[in-house]
Amino acid sequence: TQADGTYPTNLLIGRAITPCSFPNISDWGHFQSAPITSIEDFHAALDAATVRNAILIRGEVAVDQPIIKRRYASEPRHIRDVDREWLALDFEKAPPVPESINFFDLEAVGRHVVTAYLPPEYHTADFIVEATASHGLKGREARLRLFFLLARPVPNHELKAFIAGCNRAAGAVVFDASLYDAGHIHYIVPPTF
Protein backbone atom coordinates (compact mmCIF):
# COMPACT_ATOMS: atom_id res chain seq x y z
CA THR A 1 0.00 0.00 0.00
CA GLN A 2 1.25 3.49 -0.83
CA ALA A 3 1.26 6.42 1.62
CA ASP A 4 -2.01 7.71 0.18
CA GLY A 5 -3.70 4.34 0.84
CA THR A 6 -3.82 3.25 -2.80
CA TYR A 7 -2.45 -0.01 -4.10
CA PRO A 8 0.06 0.20 -6.92
CA THR A 9 -0.88 -2.45 -9.43
CA ASN A 10 0.26 -3.80 -12.75
CA LEU A 11 -1.48 -4.51 -16.00
CA LEU A 12 -0.10 -7.54 -17.78
CA ILE A 13 -0.27 -6.65 -21.46
CA GLY A 14 0.78 -9.01 -24.22
CA ARG A 15 -0.06 -9.88 -27.79
CA ALA A 16 -1.96 -12.85 -29.15
CA ILE A 17 0.37 -14.24 -31.81
CA THR A 18 -2.22 -16.77 -32.93
CA PRO A 19 -5.69 -15.69 -31.84
CA CYS A 20 -7.78 -18.24 -29.96
CA SER A 21 -9.35 -20.80 -32.22
CA PHE A 22 -10.07 -24.47 -32.09
CA PRO A 23 -8.39 -26.68 -30.95
CA ASN A 24 -8.62 -24.09 -28.20
CA ILE A 25 -4.98 -23.09 -27.98
CA SER A 26 -3.44 -19.71 -28.58
CA ASP A 27 0.15 -18.53 -28.48
CA TRP A 28 0.85 -15.38 -26.54
CA GLY A 29 3.82 -13.19 -27.18
CA HIS A 30 5.95 -11.17 -24.84
CA PHE A 31 4.08 -9.77 -21.88
CA GLN A 32 4.97 -6.45 -20.37
CA SER A 33 3.98 -5.25 -16.97
CA ALA A 34 2.57 -1.72 -16.96
CA PRO A 35 2.61 -0.19 -13.47
CA ILE A 36 -0.44 1.91 -12.63
CA THR A 37 -1.46 3.91 -9.59
CA SER A 38 -4.26 6.02 -11.06
CA ILE A 39 -7.03 5.84 -13.64
CA GLU A 40 -4.88 8.13 -15.82
CA ASP A 41 -2.01 5.59 -15.69
CA PHE A 42 -4.51 2.86 -16.55
CA HIS A 43 -5.80 4.83 -19.55
CA ALA A 44 -2.25 5.60 -20.75
CA ALA A 45 -1.27 1.91 -20.53
CA LEU A 46 -4.33 0.88 -22.54
CA ASP A 47 -3.68 3.62 -25.11
CA ALA A 48 -0.05 2.50 -25.46
CA ALA A 49 -1.17 -1.05 -26.26
CA THR A 50 -2.27 -0.31 -29.80
CA VAL A 51 -0.68 -3.28 -31.54
CA ARG A 52 -2.99 -5.64 -33.37
CA ASN A 53 -4.25 -8.41 -31.07
CA ALA A 54 -3.14 -6.64 -27.87
CA ILE A 55 -4.46 -8.50 -24.87
CA LEU A 56 -4.75 -8.05 -21.13
CA ILE A 57 -5.04 -10.87 -18.59
CA ARG A 58 -5.87 -10.85 -14.87
CA GLY A 59 -3.34 -13.57 -14.11
CA GLU A 60 0.42 -13.54 -13.88
CA VAL A 61 2.84 -15.30 -16.20
CA ALA A 62 4.41 -18.08 -14.16
CA VAL A 63 7.30 -18.86 -16.51
CA ASP A 64 9.87 -16.76 -18.32
CA GLN A 65 9.54 -17.72 -21.96
CA PRO A 66 8.81 -15.70 -25.08
CA ILE A 67 5.70 -17.63 -26.10
CA ILE A 68 3.06 -18.82 -23.68
CA LYS A 69 0.65 -21.62 -24.59
CA ARG A 70 -2.80 -21.04 -23.17
CA ARG A 71 -5.76 -23.37 -23.17
CA TYR A 72 -8.91 -21.53 -24.16
CA ALA A 73 -11.20 -23.42 -21.83
CA SER A 74 -10.56 -23.77 -18.14
CA GLU A 75 -6.86 -24.46 -17.60
CA PRO A 76 -4.47 -21.70 -18.56
CA ARG A 77 -0.98 -23.18 -18.67
CA HIS A 78 1.85 -21.07 -17.33
CA ILE A 79 -0.58 -18.51 -15.90
CA ARG A 80 -0.99 -18.04 -12.15
CA ASP A 81 -4.15 -16.67 -10.53
CA VAL A 82 -3.44 -13.45 -8.60
CA ASP A 83 -5.61 -10.84 -6.92
CA ARG A 84 -5.76 -7.64 -8.93
CA GLU A 85 -6.71 -4.06 -8.10
CA TRP A 86 -8.53 -3.51 -11.38
CA LEU A 87 -11.81 -4.61 -12.85
CA ALA A 88 -12.78 -4.94 -16.51
CA LEU A 89 -16.49 -5.32 -17.29
CA ASP A 90 -17.93 -6.41 -20.62
CA PHE A 91 -21.44 -5.00 -20.89
CA GLU A 92 -23.75 -6.74 -23.36
CA LYS A 93 -27.29 -7.91 -24.07
CA ALA A 94 -29.04 -5.16 -22.14
CA PRO A 95 -32.11 -3.08 -22.91
CA PRO A 96 -31.52 -0.29 -25.46
CA VAL A 97 -29.92 2.94 -24.26
CA PRO A 98 -32.61 5.63 -23.74
CA GLU A 99 -33.11 8.07 -26.63
CA SER A 100 -32.21 10.96 -24.30
CA ILE A 101 -28.56 9.77 -24.30
CA ASN A 102 -26.31 10.38 -27.31
CA PHE A 103 -25.46 6.80 -28.28
CA PHE A 104 -22.14 7.84 -29.82
CA ASP A 105 -20.98 9.64 -26.67
CA LEU A 106 -19.28 6.64 -25.06
CA GLU A 107 -18.72 8.45 -21.78
CA ALA A 108 -22.45 9.25 -21.49
CA VAL A 109 -23.44 5.70 -22.45
CA GLY A 110 -20.87 4.33 -19.99
CA ARG A 111 -22.19 6.54 -17.20
CA HIS A 112 -25.72 5.30 -17.98
CA VAL A 113 -24.54 1.69 -17.72
CA VAL A 114 -22.71 2.37 -14.46
CA THR A 115 -25.68 4.09 -12.79
CA ALA A 116 -28.28 1.66 -14.16
CA TYR A 117 -26.50 -1.66 -13.55
CA LEU A 118 -23.79 -1.25 -10.88
CA PRO A 119 -24.07 -0.63 -7.13
CA PRO A 120 -24.07 3.00 -5.88
CA GLU A 121 -20.39 2.98 -4.87
CA TYR A 122 -19.52 2.87 -8.59
CA HIS A 123 -21.79 5.76 -9.61
CA THR A 124 -19.23 8.47 -8.88
CA ALA A 125 -16.10 6.44 -9.62
CA ASP A 126 -13.77 7.31 -12.47
CA PHE A 127 -13.67 4.67 -15.19
CA ILE A 128 -12.48 4.04 -18.74
CA VAL A 129 -14.99 3.10 -21.40
CA GLU A 130 -14.40 1.51 -24.81
CA ALA A 131 -16.85 0.33 -27.43
CA THR A 132 -16.53 -3.32 -28.36
CA ALA A 133 -16.79 -4.49 -31.96
CA SER A 134 -20.55 -5.11 -31.71
CA HIS A 135 -21.48 -1.73 -30.18
CA GLY A 136 -24.37 -0.27 -32.14
CA LEU A 137 -24.88 -3.24 -34.45
CA LYS A 138 -28.36 -3.87 -33.03
CA GLY A 139 -29.95 -0.46 -32.80
CA ARG A 140 -29.25 1.29 -29.50
CA GLU A 141 -27.96 -1.81 -27.69
CA ALA A 142 -24.69 -0.85 -26.03
CA ARG A 143 -21.71 -3.19 -26.08
CA LEU A 144 -19.01 -1.67 -23.91
CA ARG A 145 -15.91 -2.52 -21.93
CA LEU A 146 -15.56 -0.59 -18.69
CA PHE A 147 -12.35 -0.48 -16.63
CA PHE A 148 -12.18 0.50 -12.94
CA LEU A 149 -9.44 0.70 -10.34
CA LEU A 150 -10.45 -0.95 -7.07
CA ALA A 151 -9.68 0.05 -3.49
CA ARG A 152 -7.99 -3.28 -2.77
CA PRO A 153 -6.72 -6.37 -4.58
CA VAL A 154 -9.71 -8.61 -5.33
CA PRO A 155 -9.59 -12.31 -6.21
CA ASN A 156 -11.36 -13.57 -9.30
CA HIS A 157 -13.86 -15.67 -7.33
CA GLU A 158 -15.10 -12.51 -5.56
CA LEU A 159 -15.47 -10.72 -8.89
CA LYS A 160 -17.47 -13.64 -10.30
CA ALA A 161 -19.83 -13.43 -7.31
CA PHE A 162 -20.06 -9.63 -7.70
CA ILE A 163 -20.95 -9.91 -11.41
CA ALA A 164 -23.49 -12.66 -10.69
CA GLY A 165 -25.14 -10.30 -8.18
CA CYS A 166 -25.19 -7.43 -10.69
CA ASN A 167 -26.74 -9.70 -13.31
CA ARG A 168 -29.36 -10.95 -10.81
CA ALA A 169 -30.24 -7.36 -9.88
CA ALA A 170 -30.60 -6.48 -13.58
CA GLY A 171 -32.80 -9.51 -14.21
CA ALA A 172 -30.59 -10.43 -17.17
CA VAL A 173 -27.01 -11.33 -18.02
CA VAL A 174 -25.74 -7.84 -18.82
CA PHE A 175 -22.13 -8.41 -17.71
CA ASP A 176 -19.95 -11.26 -18.95
CA ALA A 177 -18.82 -13.30 -15.94
CA SER A 178 -16.31 -15.40 -17.89
CA LEU A 179 -13.66 -12.67 -17.73
CA TYR A 180 -12.58 -13.55 -14.19
CA ASP A 181 -10.20 -16.42 -14.78
CA ALA A 182 -6.45 -15.96 -14.60
CA GLY A 183 -5.86 -16.61 -18.28
CA HIS A 184 -8.99 -15.20 -19.84
CA ILE A 185 -8.10 -12.85 -22.69
CA HIS A 186 -9.31 -9.24 -22.69
CA TYR A 187 -8.75 -7.85 -26.19
CA ILE A 188 -7.97 -4.20 -25.52
CA VAL A 189 -7.46 -2.53 -28.88
CA PRO A 190 -10.61 -0.54 -29.68
CA PRO A 191 -12.39 -1.77 -32.80
CA THR A 192 -12.30 0.05 -36.10
CA PHE A 193 -15.77 0.95 -37.35
Image (cartoon, rainbow, N blue to C red):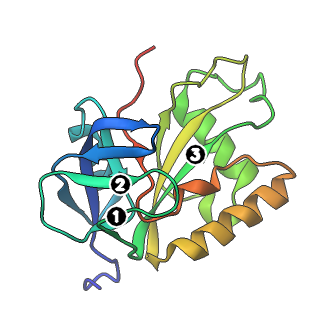
Q: Which mark is residue 90?
A: 3
User: Tag on residue 172?
Assistant: none
Lateral position of residue 62 relative to residue 20, left or right: left
Q: Amino acid at mark 1?
A: Arg
Among numbered discs 3 and 1, the one appearing first in the sequence: 1
Mark 2, residue position? 70
Relative vertical location of residue 99 with respect to residue 9 in this rendering, above or below = above
Sequence-first disc among 3 and 2 = 2
Q: Which residue is mark 1?
A: 77
Residue at 59% of width from left, 40% of height from top?
Answer: 110
Q: The disc labelled 3 sits on which kind of residue?
A: Asp
Query: How crowded is the residue under tag 1: few (<14 C-alpha within 10 Å), some, or many (20+)?
Result: some
Q: Position of residue 161 (x, y in %)?
A: 68, 71
Answer yes or no: is residue 6 visible: yes
Residue 127 x %, y %: 47, 51
Element at label 3: strand
Residue 69 in picture, x, y percent from top left:
29, 53
Give neighbour class at mark 3: few <14, some 14-19, many 20+ (Cα, 10 Å): many
At x 35% / y 83%, what residue is drawn?
A: 5
**Tally of numbered discs:** 3
Placement of 158 over or under 56, stated as above or below: below
Residue type (three-letter) at the residue carrying disc 2? Arg
Mark 2 packing: few (<14 Cα in 10 Å), some, or many (20+)? many
**In front of the other: label 3 or label 2?**
2
- Give the left or right position of residue 46, taking residue 175 as reference: left
Residue shown at the point (45%, 55%) measured from the top left: 184
Q: Is residue 46 above or below residue 152?
A: above
Q: Considering only vertical position in the picture, is 180 above or below 99?
A: below
